Amino acid sequence: EIWSTPPPMNTNIRVSLPAVCFVWQIAMIILFGVFIRYNEESDVRKWIEFKHSHNITSDIENDFYFRYPSFQDVHVMIFVGFGFLMTFLKRYSFSGVGFNFLIAAFGLQWALLMQGWFHSLDPNTGKIYIGVENLINADFCVAGSLIAYGALLGKVSPVQLMVVTLFGVTLFAVEEYIILDLLHCRDAGGSMVIHAFGGYYGLAISWVLYRPNLHQSKRLNGSVYHSDVFAMIGTLFLWMFWPSFNSAITAHGDGQHRAVINTYLALASSVLTAVAISSMSQKRGKLDMVHIQNATLAGGVAMGTAAEFMITPYGSLIVGFCCGIISTFGYVFVTPFLEKYFKIQDTCGIHNLHAVPGMLGGFVGAIVAAAASVEVYGREGLIETFAFEGDFATRSVLTQGGYQAAGTCVAITFGLVGGALVGFILKFPIWGDPADDNCYDDEVYWEVREQRSNSILQERNNIFDTKVLCHSCIATFTHDTFV
Amino acid sequence: EIWSTPPPMNTNIRVSLPAVCFVWQIAMIILFGVFIRYNEESDVRKWIEFKHSHNITSDIENDFYFRYPSFQDVHVMIFVGFGFLMTFLKRYSFSGVGFNFLIAAFGLQWALLMQGWFHSLDPNTGKIYIGVENLINADFCVAGSLIAYGALLGKVSPVQLMVVTLFGVTLFAVEEYIILDLLHCRDAGGSMVIHAFGGYYGLAISWVLYRPNLHQSKRLNGSVYHSDVFAMIGTLFLWMFWPSFNSAITAHGDGQHRAVINTYLALASSVLTAVAISSMSQKRGKLDMVHIQNATLAGGVAMGTAAEFMITPYGSLIVGFCCGIISTFGYVFVTPFLEKYFKIQDTCGIHNLHAVPGMLGGFVGAIVAAAASVEVYGREGLIETFAFEGDFATRSVLTQGGYQAAGTCVAITFGLVGGALVGFILKFPIWGDPADDNCYDDEVYWEVREQRSNSILQERNNIFDTKVLCHSCIATFTHDTFV
Amino acid sequence: EIWSTPPPMNTNIRVSLPAVCFVWQIAMIILFGVFIRYNEESDVRKWIEFKHSHNITSDIENDFYFRYPSFQDVHVMIFVGFGFLMTFLKRYSFSGVGFNFLIAAFGLQWALLMQGWFHSLDPNTGKIYIGVENLINADFCVAGSLIAYGALLGKVSPVQLMVVTLFGVTLFAVEEYIILDLLHCRDAGGSMVIHAFGGYYGLAISWVLYRPNLHQSKRLNGSVYHSDVFAMIGTLFLWMFWPSFNSAITAHGDGQHRAVINTYLALASSVLTAVAISSMSQKRGKLDMVHIQNATLAGGVAMGTAAEFMITPYGSLIVGFCCGIISTFGYVFVTPFLEKYFKIQDTCGIHNLHAVPGMLGGFVGAIVAAAASVEVYGREGLIETFAFEGDFATRSVLTQGGYQAAGTCVAITFGLVGGALVGFILKFPIWGDPADDNCYDDEVYWEVREQRSNSILQERNNIFDTKVLCHSCIATFTHDTFV
C-alpha cells in the first residue's frame, strides 16, 4: 500500500527560502534608507528642540515611558505567546515556534513601511518618522498573519508562509486605513483589524488549500504530553499580557488604565466558562487541553475594541462569559463541522479563538460606542475617547456605533477575499509544500538529529530486531542440536 | 492484591465543576454590577476632573505608570511562576499549571470584591472604585490560595480547589483587614498576610485530608527529567520578579526603589546557601532539583515585610543567607518528619518555602520596624514609611514592632484555624477527589491522548510482545521441522 | 576497551562547593556592611531631601521609573535567556539552567562591589551608593561570565564556574573602567565590554582546558527534540528583550527610545539572514536549530555600542544583515575549524554569537561615532550623546572613533589574557571537573531520579532481555520436546 502513493512532493527549499530572505531583506534596507527616519521623540536633535518648543521639563514625558512596558508585553505575545501556542503538535514544535519567529521578524519590517505610508508619511519631506508606537503597531500588524498561520499549521512551507505574511501585512495596512482613518472607527486592541481580519484571512486560505487526503498525516496531528505543556507557556503569556495588548496604544492616562482593567476581567471570566463547557463536553467531566490552551483567551480577543470604552467592569465580565462559552463550543462542534461540510482544515481552531470572538468584539464595540453618553464620559471625555475632532467633530455616538459595525464587516470582507486570492497564489507548485502524508512533520524542513523514539517506526524496529534475534537464536539452536 | 482495594472513588465532575463555574461566574457578574466601578484614575470623566482639581499637567502622574510594570511582573508570578513550579510531577503537569490557572482566574474576581468591601468601599455611594492597585492586591490575595494548592497538589479535585480558593480569599480579606487596618501593620510584600497565612492554611487542610494509603500512588509522586526543567521556568520567573512583588504596592519613589534592591539582594544570597546545603545533604555533593526549584526563593518570601524598610543592603543579604539555609534544611529533614509524625502530606513543601520563611519574614519586619530611628529615616520619612498618621500619629516604632509581631501571629492563626475548618468541609464525599492509588495522575481529570510511553506498563507490553513472538516463531519452527 | 580507561576523576564536590558558597556569601555580607548603602533615590531620608533641593515635585522623576522595566527585561535575559539557551543538550539541561542561576546570583553581588569601587565610590564617605542603575550594571557584568560558560558548558564543575565568575567579574570591572572611564568610550549595550570580552574570555579558557579525548562523551553532546524546544525559550526571551538590554542605561528620553528602535531593527534583520544561510548550508534546504537558536541574536550583540547613536534605521538593518550571515557561517564552518586546528572546544559557539559580533559591534560603534556631525546631532545632542564634558569637552568625533576602536582591542586583550590565566588556575586537579567520558552529563553533579529512557543503555537492555527470553523459551522448548 505504501508503494502506491505518489512520489513525495519536492520540499527542497534550499534555493527559494534563502532567495526570498535575501531579496526581501535587501529591499527592506533600500526602502528604509529612502523612507524611515527617527521621530521627534527618538532623534536626539529633534527631542531637544521638541522639549524646548513644548516647554517640557522632564524626559519622562517622552512617549517611550508611556508605552515601552506595554510594547515589550506585546512583543512577548507575538514571539513567545503565538510561537509556543503553536508547539502543541507532537512533531511540529520546531516549525510552530521557529516559523512564527521567522515570519514575524520578516513581517514587522514590511509593516513599518506599509503602515507608515498609510498613516504617518510626512507630505513635506516624504519620510516616515517612527517611534515606539510604530513598533507596537508593526507587531500588531504582524499578528494578523500569525493568526492565519494557526489555520495553516503543518500544511505549508516556510516560503508559503512568507507569501502569506507579505500579502497579509499589505492587506492589513489597507483595511486598517479604511477602518481607522476613512470610517474613523476606534479599535485599539484590534478585535476587528487584527482578529476578525486575521481569522477569516487564514480560514479562506485554508479553504482554498483544502487537502482531501490529509488523514494520511493523522498520526502526527495531535499532541504528546510535554508538547501540551509547552503550548501552555504560549497560552499563559498571551493571557497575562493581553491587558497590555489592548491598552498599548490607547490614550495616555485613564485610557490605558481602563483598557487594562476591562481586559483583565474579561479574560478571568472566559477562563471559568471555557473550563465549564470543556468539562461538560467530555465523558466523566474531563478537561481537554485544547480548550484550556485556546478558549480561555477568547475574552481578550473580544475586548479588543471595547476595552478603552466605559464598558463597565461587569460589562467586561459578561463579554468574557459569553465568549468563553462560544469559543469552547466552537472547538467541540464547529471545527469538525467546518472541516466536514465546508472543507476548511483549521489546525489551531482560529475560527473559534480569533475569527468569531474578533467579529463579536467588533459588534460589542459598536454597541458600547452607540450607548456612550455625556453623562458617563463627560463632554471632554467623549471627544477624547472617540476622537470627535476635525472632520468628525459633529458625529453622534449612534453614527459612531454604525461605523464600528461597518468596520467589522470591512475587516471580515478583506480577510475572506484577500485570503481566497492568496490561497490561489499558494497553489502554484513552486513553493515546496509538503505531501499529504508528510504534513505536521518537522523533518521536512528541519534537521532533526534525534531518532523518533517511542514512535510507531521505533516499535516496528523493535519487533523486527526481536524477530531477527529469534530466528538467529533458533538457527543456532537447530544447528547445535541437529548437526 | 490489586483486587482487594475498594472500588475507585467517583471522580466524575461533569456536573459539579461546570455548576460551580457557572453559578460563581454569574454571581460575580451580578455583584460587580452592584458594587464595582472605575476609580478616578481609570474613569475618563473622573480623571479629567481629577487632573483639573489636583493641578496635574501630565498623564504620567496616573498611578498606572507607577505600578503597571510591577503589576505585570506579579501577574507572571501568579500564572507562570506558581503554575510552572507545580509542573514538576511526572504526570501531573496539566493539573499543576491548569488548575492553578483556573483557581487564580476564579479567585481574583472574588478578591476584588472582598478586599473592596473591607478596604475601599465608599460609604457615600456604596461602591468599590478600582484601579491598577486593586488588580495587584487581587493577585496577591489569590496567591495565598495558590500556596495552599502547593500542599494539596495531586490529592484533590478541581472542585475542591475552588472551595479552597473561595474560603481562602475570604479568610485572606479578613485577616488582611485585621493586620493592616486594625493593627496598622506594614506588609507590602505579604510575608505575613500572604506567605505565613497561605502556608499554614495549606498545611492545616493537608493535615485534615491526611491519606494513610497515599503510598499507593508513590510511583507517580516524583519528577522526570523534562518535568524538572519545566518547573525551573516557574522558579526563575518567581525569582526574577520577586523584587516587583515586594515593591508593587509600596510608596512611590524611594519606597518602590528600595524594596527592589533589598529583595534582589536577599534572593541572590539565598541561592548561594540553598546550593550549599543541598550539596552537603547528598552523597558526592550532588544537587537536588527540589531544593534549587524552591529554597532559592526563600529570601524573597522572607523580605515581604521588611523590603520597604531601611533594612540596609547587608541586612537583606543576611536575611537571604539564613532563609536559604532554613528552607533547604526543611526540604531535607522537616518535610519527611512532618509526614511521619504530624500526618501532614505537603507535596511541594510549602512549609519550607512559604510557612516558615513567611513567619520569619514577619518577625524580621517587626525587628526592623522596632529598630527604626529618626536618624536613619528622617522625621518625614518615618511618618511616610510607617504611615504614622491619623489615629496612629503618636505610635512609637517600638510599639509598631510589637504590632508587626502580633500581626504575624494573627496570620498564622487564621491559616491554621481556617485551614482546619476548610479541610473538614472538603472531607464530604461529594467533591470528586481521587482514590489513594489515583493521586498525582492527570488522567483522572484530563483527556490525555498519548499512551504513557516509557512507563512500567509499556515495558511490560514490550516483554509480552517478545514472548508472543518467541512462542510464535518457535511454534513455526517446530511445525516446519517436525511436521 | 572500557576497562582500559583511567579510573573516573573525583567529581565529589560535597566539601568544595558548600565551602565556596559559604565563605563567599559571608565575605559579601561583610563587604556590603562596610561599603554598600542606598543612594539618594532609594534612601527615604535622602530622597525627601533630594526632592526638596532639586525642586522635584513628582516621585515619577525617580530614576526607578525610567529604568526599572528595562532592568526586569535584562534580568529575564540573564536568568531565563542565558539559562534556557543552555538547556539544549540532551542530558545537561539541569546544569545549563541551574549553574547559570548559581553563578549569576553569585557574580552579581561581587559585581556590585567591584563596579562600585571603580565607578561610584564616594571619596568622602568611602561608601558605594546603589540604585536601580547599579543593579542593571551588575547584571551586565555577570553576563560576561555567563557568555564564557557557554564555551565551557558540559566540561567544567560548578566550583570551576565560580572561579570563572569570580575572576570574570573582576576582570570585567577593570576593563570596563579602562574603556569607559579612561578611554571615555561609549558602550551602553556592551558590544565591547560584555560580548567581545566575555566571548574571548571563554574561548581562551576553553583553549587552555582542551580535552583531546572529549569524543568519549560524543553521545551526549547533542540535543533531543524537547531540549531544543526548551532552548528556544532562551532564544526568544533574549531576542525580545535585547532592545531593553541595549537601552537600559542609555540617556533618558531620546537615548533609550532610539536604542530600542535600532536594536529591534537589527535583530529582525539578522533573523532573515540567519535563516537564509542556515537553509543554504544543509541539503534540501533544511534549517538547523543551532543556527536559529543563536545566530538570530547576532544583530543585538552587534548593536551594543552603536544602538544609542544616530546610526539610522537602515543602518541598523545593515548591521543585522551582515552579522546574521557572519554568525551562521561561523556555526557552519568556523567552530569545527577552531576545534580541529586551534584546539578550542566551544560548546555553544560563543565565538560566533558573542566574540565576533561583539568585536564587529565595537568597530561599528567606532565608525558611527567618527561619522557623527553637528548637523545630525545638534551641538547639544553631540555633547549629550558622547558626554563631551569635563576633561573630554574638546574631543572631536574622529578622536572618539579612534578611542572606540582602541576600547574594542582592550576588551579583546583582557578576554584573551585573562582567560588564559584563569584557564591555568582551573587546571589544578582540585576542582572536581568531570572525566572525558563523563562530560555533558547532569548525573555527575545532580541527583537524577529518572532512568535514562530511550538511551543506548536502555536499548542494550532490551536486546539483552530479548536474548534471555529467547534462550529461556528455547530451553523450555527443548526440555519439553526432547526430555
Image (tube, coloured by chain):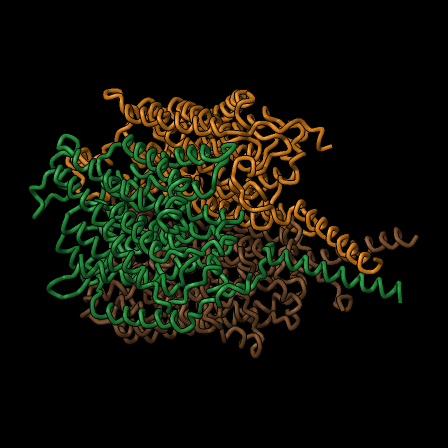
Chain colours: A green, B orange, C brown
Is residue C177 visible in the rendered image? The answer is no
Tell me if A408 is positioned left or right of A210 in this view. left
Give me the residue at 61% from left, 39% from top. B331
Give me the residue at 35% from left, 41% from top. A298
Q: Quadrant of the N terminus of chain C?
A: bottom right
- Camera-side residue: B385 or B354? B354
Is residue C95 visible in the rendered image? The answer is yes
Residue furthest to the bottom: C341
Vertical position of residue A375 compared to residue A327: above or below:
above
Residue A127 appears at what percent x and percent y? 17, 65
Vertical position of residue C415 compared to residue B174: above or below:
below
Residue B466 appears at what percent x and percent y? 72, 53
Question: In which image quadrant can residue C323 be found?
Answer: bottom left
Tag count = 0
Tell me if C448 is positioned left or right of C225 in this view. right
Give me the residue at 54% from left, 47% from top. A225
Residue B315 appears at what percent x and percent y? 48, 42
Residue A2 appears at what percent x and percent y? 55, 62
- Camera-side residue: B377 or C191? C191
Residue furthest to the right: C483
Vertical position of residue C303 compared to residue B361: above or below:
below
- Camera-side residue: C9 or A81? A81
